[in-house]
Amino acid sequence: MGQIEWAMWANEQALASGLILITGGIVATAGRFTQWYFGAYSIAAGVLICLLEYPRGKRKKGSTMERCGQKYLTTVVKLFGPLTRNYYVRAVLHFLLSVPAGFLLATILGTVCLVIASVIYLLAAIRGEQWTPIEPKPKERPQVGGTIKQPPTNPPPRPPVEARKKPSVDEEEAASAGGPQVNPIPVTDEVV
Amino acid sequence: MAVSWRSWLANEGVKHLCLLIWLSLNVLLFWKTFLLYNQGPEYYYIHQMLGISISGNCYPVQLYSQRRARPYEMRPFTFSGFKTVCATAMDGDNTVMGEDFLYNFFLFFCNSYLVGLCLSRASASVLNLNCSLILLPMCRTLLAYLRGSQKVPSRRTRRLLDKSKTLHITCGITICVFSGVHVAAHLMNALNFSVNYSENFLELNAARYQNEDPRKLLFTTVPGLTGVCMVVVLFLMVTASTYAIRVSNYDIFWYTHNLFFVFYMLLLLHVSGGLLKYQTNLDTHPPGCISLNQTQDQDIYSPEDFSEHFHGPLPEGFSKPEARNQKTLVKICLEEPKFQAHFPQTWIWISGPLCLYCAERLYRCIRSNKPVTIISVINHPSDVMELRMVKENFKARPGQYIILHCPSVSALENHPFTLTMCPTETKATFGVHFKVVGDWTERFRDLLLPPSSQDSEILPFIQSRNYPKLYIDGPFGSPFEESLNYEVSLCVAGGIGVTPFASILNTLLDDWKPYKLRRLYFIWVCRDIRSFQWFADLLCMLHNKFWQENRPDYVNIQLYLSQTDGIQKIIGEKYHTLNSRLIIGRPRWKLLFDEIAKCNRGKTVGVFCCGPSSISKTLHNLSNQSNSYGTKFEYNKESFS
């Protein structure tokens, strides 16, 4: 259990809770229940949580799968600096956001799920995890002339290419020649 | 090239047919249950209670009401009020819709309770089916037995077993979706129960008093509380089962998924609540009958009085009570209606698969209780270790895999590895090759071989070799077992994915005659040339053996080195056969398929791939394409995570 990164799981949970909150809020507002303004609040809270949690953080070891189109939101989330990097802040934020939605029947499940997500974020924060944005890798430009390592050592006039290359060709031939292929059974052609 | 419909049908047809059958079962169940609760006469009184109260007014939940005396209290909505609303909506022109239509529309509006009641029961029946089906693909020993036995003679049916994990995931997603529907519908029911509380229906109502807070209903009744806990457990399980989590932190997925047992226990309790009741004495008290002792309380039982309670004139065209009396038979109530809770159907649905699964886990536990004896440990290049063991009464077929559990490395984790050598009649040794990738394999290697001797290939002779205790669970089946049952097989391996095919090659080395296989195309793609040394000896021995038996074309070996830095490489000086079959670069699959099709006209070739998903997708596409030689390619692959 030593190397589990809890933040990734908390991220999935928070995203799912955000969606549940949005659904519950829509049901509550459209049905115009009493205290329907809690429903409107939960839609807004759900949208905020989804936007915050959509960009996945980078794993410590190994490659991370990005969510589709997350790089635009990554730039926005990165702007907030320590507020979004620190998981303690996220845990507290999720807990506070979940409390008002608990008063309405339609959104009570969203509250429960968001509270669980905030507990897991707290666990991740205690273990010292942090949110690092996934940066796009800079494209490596093909290096022109990368194989030219050293200038020629011999001053001109230099002997032609064949004369210089001869010893290495001989070495290669000797290494690969373990003898010709020997057939296990002697092969003869039967000529009648 | 165009996708040949014949090949597509052979490869994908049965799979899609099963999907269709499963889908239609779900739809049928949903529809039947919905109609039963909508129209069944034994639910007449519960409809009465939820939708229409004693004063003949209905309380449709969705309607907007401005004045709220207390939370969850709705203003009653009458037919005249409804007509006024419609009139204002149509700018005073109410003659467009006749009174008949308006009245039926009003009744439909009032029947909004149907959404709560019928939807919740219909989704519950779909959940029953899926909760029972989802356990079946996880009975791995049973599936392995079915694969190997003669009970499933057709290869087409055996190939269905490859898709067991897909069935599990599909049922899981369905459970999530319909749980959402079920929860939403029951929340509406809770609201209706509390708002429509009346003294007439004490037995039917779950609420204890008028306008009881539905949240209290949710948390203090057995079904409500177990339902909330089940949703929490489902939430934890589903969020940990996404592809990203499985690939990065498999542990979280594994530990949360074992909560399924809690889920099933809660489910068994959830349905024992008995909140929904149906009428049992339909013959002595048919719904809508007239009670001979007409008192105030029993007015509600007669449908004629029902219309009198509407505020406002009776709409024309709607049959008057006297007329209705003449038309329909008037029934007299012989006794009071009796209500009884349903027998929990869910117990019948899930008890079978749950018992089967528990029995299988018990059997696996008992079978894996004895530790294995490790015979030798061999270090291979590129971080691969080979482990050879014996265990009594262990039988395995080539292509199967086992799960290793080593308490000294980790008490809770266990990991699957494909067998590279199966026990035969003459030799009881079996072995696995594993690549050291994560922390479990690293620690396992350190326990097997002291770190100091890991660099050298020659192992120092130690007097007493203390190997850790190792338990194995299995063997379990995989689609690679089928490769011996085709006349021609194409086996493509990528890197360490060669392990299932290694067991096939070992079996062929032992004795190839009993199997149907007559030609094997073996393609192995690696990044590092030293990887080929894992099985270089095996391949050379196999090649020599077939030469000796005068069947040089039985195995066709092609080795590809996909990444190269330009320097000429060889596998090893003594491996002549392999060096001459080594090709630098990536394989060209289309040309390979054309060559195989040309050389094996009219035959069915089994295609097996164990490697990166890009290769697998390419092979799948090529298997579905047609060729001009009449050769059919059947693609076999198991869906891993």
Image (cartoon, rainbow, N blue to C red):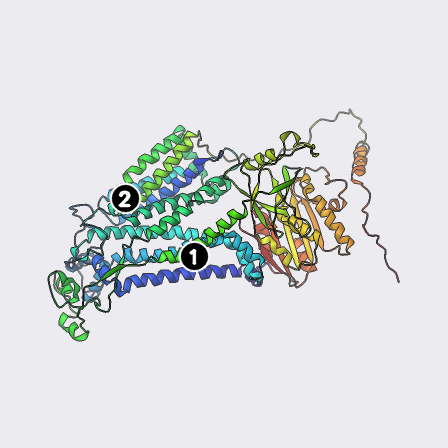
Quarter occupied by residue B330: bottom left
Q: Residue at x 68, y 40 (%)?
A: B529
Q: Are marks 1 and 2 in contact (CB under 8 Å)?
A: no
Residue B464 in the image, given as x and y percentages of width and height: 65, 33
The amino acid type found where label 1 is placed reads Gly
In this rendering, does residue B641 appear at all? no
Residue A137 in the image, given as x and y percentages of width and height: 53, 35
Report helix, strand or loop for mark 2. helix
Q: Which residue is mark 2?
A: A39
Q: Chain of mark 2?
A: A
The amino acid type found where label 2 is placed reads Gly
Characterize the local packing of mark 1: few (<14), some (14-19) or many (20 or more) Cα atoms within 10 angstroms.
few
Q: Which residue is mark 1?
A: B352
Q: Is residue A117 left or right of residue B598?
A: left
Quarter occupied by residue B241: top left
Q: How many marks?
A: 2
Q: Residue furthest right?
A: A192
In this rendering, does residue B60 appear at all? yes
Residue B85 in the image, given as x and y percentages of width and height: 18, 56
Q: Is residue B564 left or right of residue A157?
A: left
Reply above or below: A128 against B183.
Answer: above
Residue A133 in the image, given as x and y percentages of width and height: 46, 33
Report helix, strand or loop for mark 1. helix
